[in-house]
Every structure is written in structure tokens, then in C-alpha cells.
Amino acid sequence: MDYPIVDLLEMVGFASRGGKYASGKAVVMTHVSKKDYLNKFLFEPLPVESTLHLHLADVLNAAVTSRTVASMQDAIEWLTWFFFYRRLPQNPNFYSLDGVSDAQLSDFLSTLVENTATDLQEAGAIAIDEQALQPLNLGVLSAHLYIRVQTTKLFSLSITAKTKRRGLLQILSSAEEFEEVRSPARAHS
């Protein structure tokens, strides 16, 4: 039977748990045609990529709120502190980069920060004054309560003084934070 590679890696991991067993062995029997494929996954480390760029709005909002980042230039320099920046030149295709020269990396980061800051401004989380970034009330609430910026935007646009309990529950349940609850098809591991 062909096991998915994830299951195979888990079984090998159980066989070699340190502290629980003095030693462990995993025997993998396979067709010769699949030997090289399995050896690659069992003996070579898998690359780990950053997904910071996919969640940058909330992270940048927290940095602006805490005054770690006060300008667009600060935001670009701040991004260079992360694992994300180290992975950009290592796997440019994953991050949709055109190239890995210093100029191309700089342009990519500038565009990323600009687009993210604009999204935050449109959500009412920050104000952009020339190149300065200032936190606004919705951004501060999002950062301090660990709520996504899009959720606080949804709440601010949807909830009024006349909103009834049923409406409040509908608005609350449509928050991104509850996506996993709404999608029963997602597997929990």
C-alpha cells in the first residue's frame, strides 16, 4: 500500500522519538522505482518558507501601533529583520519575485509595504501622512485585542446602535477568525 509521504514521515518520527525509546528503527519497503523519491523526503530536509507576506497587514498594524514602525522606510527596514527576508532570494518563485538582485528585492519590499499600508489605511487602522504611519483607533483595537484588521473593519462598518442581537451574532460569526468553524471540510490535525 502506498502511504502518503506525510504519514510516512510521521511514522518514522514516532520510531525515532528521543527520550521515550533508547533507539528506534524504521523499515520502509517499496518498489525500486520509488526508492529515490522516498530517500529524498526521508533524508533531505524540507525547505520551510515564510508566509509573512500573506499576513503582513496585521503584523504591520501591530508594529505601527507599538511605534516600532513610524514610516514607510522604517517598515521596509523592519521587514529585513524577519526570516521572510532571508527566504526571498532562496526561493523567489514562491514569493513571486522577478529576480533576486538588490534592486529587485528593494522594489519588491517597497511595493509590498506600500500596498499593505494602503490596505491598512482603507481599513481605518492607520493614517499615512506623506511617509509617516500613524495608528488609528481601529488599528489599536485590532492590535491590542489580537483581532484581524479586516474583522475590526467589518465590525465598524456593520454594527450600528440599531443592530439587534441576531444581527450581532451574524456579524460576529462572519469574522475571519471563525473561518475554521464555518468550514467543516477542513481537516484538523
Image (cartoon, grey):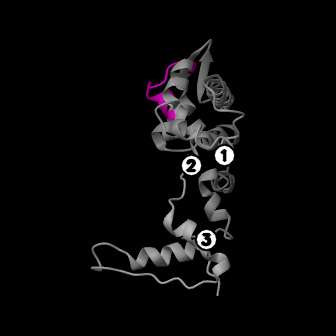
Nearer to us in this view, 173 or 108? 108
Q: Residue at x 68, y 65 (%)?
A: 183
Q: Amino acid at mark 3?
A: Asp
Q: Amino acid at mark 2?
A: Glu
Nearer to us in this view, 104 or 115? 104
Is 23 situated above or below 173? below
User: What is the quadrant of residue 3 in the picture?
Assistant: bottom right
Label at residue 94: 1
Residue tagged by mark 3? 36
Is 30 situated above or below 152? below
Residue 23 appears at what percent x and percent y? Answer: 31, 79
Over which residues does the magenta segment extend? 62-72
Give the CA distance from mark 3 to mark 1. 25 Å
Label at residue 49: 2
Q: Is residue 51 visible?
A: yes
Is there a contact, CB below 8 Å, between mark 1 and mark 2? yes
